[in-house]
Amino acid sequence: MIMNSNMEYKGYIGSVSYSDEDSVLFGKVEGINALVNYEAASVEELKKAFHEAVDDYLAFCKENDIQPDKIYSGNFNVRLTPELHKDLAYFANQTGSTINNVVKIVLERSLKREKKELTKILKTSISK
């Protein structure tokens, strides 16, 4: 069994997973242009390993004049139910907007105002 979570340091997200088979905590730094892993036997050791991994990665990037953050294109595909797609298209049309603009505004507002509530909802939906 593997359980998952995240931690944050210097604006970077680190995944936290536990392998029951190996009895080890492990993770990787998310949102970067490289694969940076870490592992430890305890939570405190994992935090320390994550911080060291981020610091080492940033130092490496600085020394080699590399952009550390992953570059996102701003484009992604979203799968919706046909009913939600229809509702979204009608709403965009009624407001004189586009589906893209409605989705952008809803996501921006939702993430700014409701991160904690969204986190609870998403974690609950994943565990079902």
Image (spheres, grey):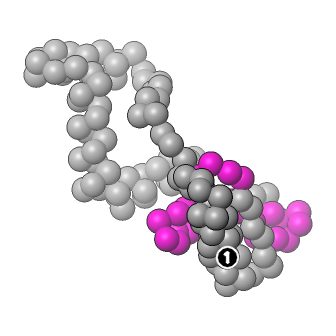
- At horizontal 59% and vertical 64% (from top left) the residue drawn is 62
Question: Which is more toward the observer, 120 or 71?
Answer: 71
Q: Quadrant of residue 53?
A: bottom right
- At horizontal 59% and vertical 56% (from top left) the residue drawn is 65
- At horizontal 10% and vertical 22% (from top left) the residue drawn is 95
Q: Secondary structure at mark 1?
A: helix
Q: Position of residue 39 (x, y in %)?
A: 77, 70
Q: Describe residue 43's horizontal placement relative to residue 9 as left or right.
A: right
User: Is there any visible trace of residue 92 in the rendered image?
Assistant: yes
Residue assigned mark 1: 52
Magenta stretch secondary structure, dominant: strand
Question: Which is more toward the observer, 38 or 3?
Answer: 38
Q: Quadrant of the N terminus?
A: bottom right
In this picture, which residue range is highlighted in magenta?
7-35
Question: Which is more toward the observer, 117 or 73?
Answer: 73
Q: Describe residue 7's horizontal placement relative to residue 101 as left or right.
A: right
Amino acid marked by disc 1: Glu
- Seen as rendered, the residue at the extreme right is 22
Q: Badge 1: how crowded within 10 Å, few (<14), some, or many (20+)?
A: few
